Amino acid sequence: MGGWKPLVCAVAASLVVDAASGCHCGDCSRSGGYVVSPGDGVERPLALYSGWRDGACWDDFACFGTCGKAGLGDVRWNDSCASEALTVFAPGRAPHRYLRDLASARTLALASPVPVPLTIWIVSEENALPGIWDDRAGRHVARALRLYQELDAGVRLEFNSATDVHRIDPARFEELMGATSYAYCDNAPRLQTPHFAAADRINVYYVPVIYSFEHGGLACGTEPEAIFVEYLGAWSANLLAHEIGHSLGLVKPRALAAEPGEIDGFPDAERNLMTSSAAEVRSLTLGQVFRIHFDADGWLGGRATDVQGGLPTCQDDAYTRAPCPPLTLTAPGGWR
Ligand SMILES: [Zn+2]
């Protein structure tokens, strides 16, 4: 009752073989009931459900399907539960969230990953630009493109090295920054002119050093979004992908700031995208994917228009639920 712990639906006892497709189906709808079918070649959908189900109110009941459908059993929305929402996820697709009209969510076609366009600005002398690109920025971008695809974040970073890399002359940069010529978030609004920031894109500024900062990268969360990355210093190639995560609305939860062994409830934390020092990034939770897409404070959420019922503002806490699923929530069934 009201607990947010997800149930793993696809337990061995309920696995059945779908004769038509030959694949295994995790079936949550033991007595028939409500089945979500994303269609369109989606084999492994995941439905995250809050609302009335089999006689009780559920928060974040997670149901994983393996034959192109996920069954939720007897569900209905009639305002009898505090939270009524259905979010459908699938690998290689953008998730979709429903707050009303459960019937229309029964069959749907999940859209392609949402584009997130990047523009790179490098503060350097002209002759230094190729080296900085080859040694730092280009590698960071390539890694970020790959990671967001591999982690099934439901977004597609858009970037063209021929048109989306620009140089800013160091003298001009100092002039823009004014008396305090520091690369720092307080000064980021000074860059928001048409020549030094691209509209409706995430602007990334590669600077020699970030003022009084020891982490190599800084996501400012200003409007429009700005990210600073240091190119002096041997920072991990995962750095840009991590900062883009911040821009997309992912916080570094308190628990993640602890040593990897001390993290409570965050699965595979040492390899999570949002762990600062992660040497190898392999993990993004379902709760994190939810926030990338549906947190009003994130880059995508801030641009979403005509969202049914509006978007929640997810709090900075890793464990509290309302109004967003916990950051620690993972998908049953193995795809995340
Ligand atoms: Zn961070």
Image: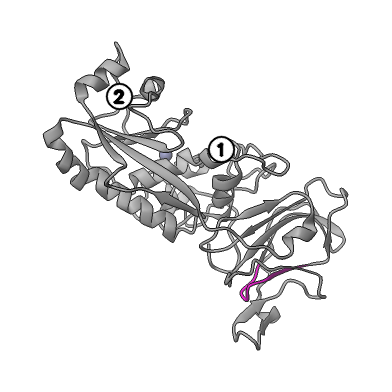
- Which one is nearer the viewer's eye here, 71 or 10? 71
Name the residue located 64 percent from the left edge and 87 percent from the top edge.
20
Q: Position of residue 205 (x, y in %)?
A: 31, 33
| Disc 1: which residue | 303
- Amino acid tagged 1: Arg
Q: Which numbered disc flags the more N-terminal residue, 2 or 1?
A: 2
Name the residue located 42 percent from the left edge and 42 percent from the top edge.
244
Q: Is residue 250 above or below residue 212?
A: below
- Which one is nearer the viewer's eye here, 228 or 37? 37
The magenta region covers: 64-72
Q: Is residue 149 above or below residue 321?
A: below
Give the structural element (helix, strand or loop) at label 1: helix
For the N terminus, which image quadrant? bottom right
Drawn side of residue 204 relative to residue 162, left or right: right
Magenta-colored stretch includes residue 65: yes
**Direction bottom: furthest residue:** 19
Q: Position of residue 249 (x, y in %)?
A: 52, 40
